[in-house]
Image (tube, rainbow, N blue to C red):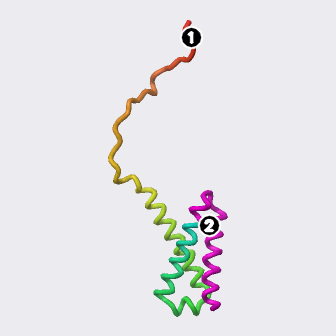
Amino acid sequence: MTTVLNALLAVVVVTAGLVVTSLDRRTAALLGAGGSTVGSFLTWVVAPRAWTDVAIVPWVAAVAGTVACIALWSAVRLYSGIFEPTRAPRDDDTAALATVGAET
């Protein structure tokens, strides 16, 4: 039971650390909680003995899962518009001079 509480504490601390240092707190909470939970779960699936016997393994798994989740999130946001068609060219009117008011 203490191992599960240790893992839950790791998830909460990693998520809170990410939320406190982030500008977008809702996204940070989602990425922190999701990434650390998935990282801890996958570590438990791959190496259950190490996850239960070594107290630092759930913490490392939570941090690694959060970092992987943030990297995946960044990659998806970076390439989100890669499959959209190109935009039509617009007229560039930056060289035009517009005056406001009555002409004298």
The residue stretch that appears in magenta? 1-28
> How far separated are the C-alphas under marks 2 and 1?
56 Å
At x 61%, y 71%, the residue is 15
Farthest residue toward the top?
Answer: 104
The kind of residue on which mark 2 rests is: Leu
User: At which x and y percent is residue 85?
Assistant: 32, 47
Is 39 located above or below residue 19 in the figure? below
> In the structure shown, which secondary structural element does the residue marked by tag 1 occupy?
loop
What's under tag 1, amino acid-wise? Ala
| Residue beneath disc 1 | 102
The picture places residue 18, in percent across and down from the top left corner, at 62, 67
Q: Judge left or right: residue 16 versus residue 93.
A: right
Which of the two discs, 2 and 1, sits closer to the camera? 1
Q: Position of residue 27 (x, y in %)?
A: 56, 62
Q: Quadrant of residue 86?
A: top left
Q: Quadrant of residue 101?
A: top right
At numbered mark 2, what does the secondary structure look like: helix, strand or loop?
helix
Identify residue for label 2. Answer: 18
* Residue 4 drawn at (x, y percent): 60, 87
Comparing 60 with 43, the one in front is 43
**Magenta segment includes 67:** no
Task: Using residue 74 as the reference point, say whether residue 15 is left or right of it.
Answer: right
